[in-house]
Amino acid sequence: MNEPYKYIFGPVLSGRLGRSLGLDLLGGRICSMNCVYCESGPLATLTLKRAPYVPAAALLDELARWEAARAAKGEARPDVITLGGLGEPTLNSDLPRIIAGVRRIAPGVPVAVLTNASLMTDETVRGELLASDIVLPSLDSLLGSEFAAVNRPHPGLNALDIAEGIRSFRARFAGRVWLEVLLVAGVNDSAENLDALELYCRALAPHRVDVVTLSRPGTEDEAKAVDAATLTRWRERLAATATRSEPAAQATEALAYTAEKRQGLEDGAVSGPRDTAQLRAALLASLTRRPQTAGQLAQALLVPEQSVHMALEGLLAQGEIAARQQDGATYFQARAPRP
Ligand code: SF4
């Protein structure tokens, strides 16, 4: 990692995907929603307009450079390459070229897409997503008032249309659909929403359902996590609608693979960023994308936690990052989103 990358971040450690190399398809805070729990900072543009916000050529040039540097250093390949960014990646109209290019540059590495599913109402977008391996749509509420309150969507969006778009995609997709529901206390955790989502998920039969709540600082301070009992109740009801346990097993395998690589690091077989400047640049790039603890950063970058702590202290002293307490943990985040 000799120079900062503009559109590539990580790898970061994802509970579901393992070591995930992120690609930013937006180049800024551009989204079709403005969720109260968003970790990406204040929204710049609320839109449904598709455009090559990050042109495929620019992104793929960078990925090829990253891949060449990784191979030259003998570092482990990421478990997955995840299309995302500080907004909704399917807004990028170069999506099909980007997926094809990722497959060419990193053959054999699964391609995942993190999406709020808003554009899955569009048949063209659904067709483009068929070329990926894992699609992770989020759907937080099927009730109009809750959808408006939690996702603060573009006025052209409707929760039921989005749900139908996901269902239609699921019927044709050969890969895996992992649905995510994020609960905000007092906003979308109602019994009516749980009943509606359970019915919907039974018909959808996603490969996996993840019910989560806020674990890191969100955009709005008043957005609060639900309690453990609520989370358990929702998980029990919705997880039962998933088709089979295979994807969860694969996620576990991915984590085990990461653990092997960590062991390799201790044995000197693989390595993350090697010097202080490289490590600081890698940390800053990662913290620009989302707040994380020192432990999460160490696991994602395959670097001893002690080294991460020292580099974080340097970045704090330089005013590049800020620290914030949440749920008994210290989260670090970059002071300003990248331009
Ligand atoms: S959480 Fe996702 S969908 Fe919601 S505003 Fe942030 S980037 Fe957009």
Image (cartoon, helix red, strand yellow):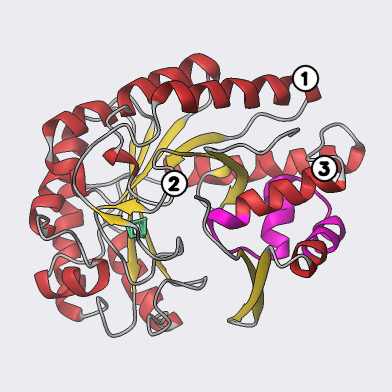
Q: Which residue is mark 3?
A: 263
304 relative to 226, above or below: above
The three-letter amino acid code for the residue at tag 1 is Ala
**Contact, mark 3 vs mark 2 (Cβ under 8 Å):** no
Q: Earlier in the sequence, mark 1 or mark 3?
A: 1
Q: Secondary structure at mark 3?
A: helix
Residue 215 shows which numbered tag?
A: none
Most foreground residue, 38 or 172: 38
Task: Answer with the quadrant where ligand 1 appears in the image.
Answer: bottom left
Q: Secondary structure at mark 1?
A: helix
Residue 196, given in percent of the width and then of the height, sits at 13, 67
Q: Earlier in the sequence, mark 3 or mark 2?
A: 2
| Magenta-span inclusion, residue 289 | yes
Q: Which residue is mark 1?
A: 72
Q: Which residues are magenta?
A: 287-312
Q: How many C-alpha atoms fall within 10 Å of the one at disc 3: few (<14), some, or many (≥20)? A: some
Residue 30, given in percent of the width and then of the height, sits at 33, 51
Name which quarter of the figure residue 143 lies in.
Answer: bottom left
Residue 85 shows which numbered tag?
A: 2
| Magenta-span inclusion, residue 250 | no
- 149 lies left or right of 84: left
Q: Secondary structure at mark 2?
A: loop
> Which residue: 44% across, 31% down?
111
Most foreground residue, 240 or 152: 152
Mark 2 CB within 8 Å of ligand 1: yes
The three-letter amino acid code for the residue at tag 3 is Gln
**Contact, mark 2 vs mark 1 (Cβ under 8 Å):** no
Residue 203, given in percent of the width and then of the height, sits at 14, 50
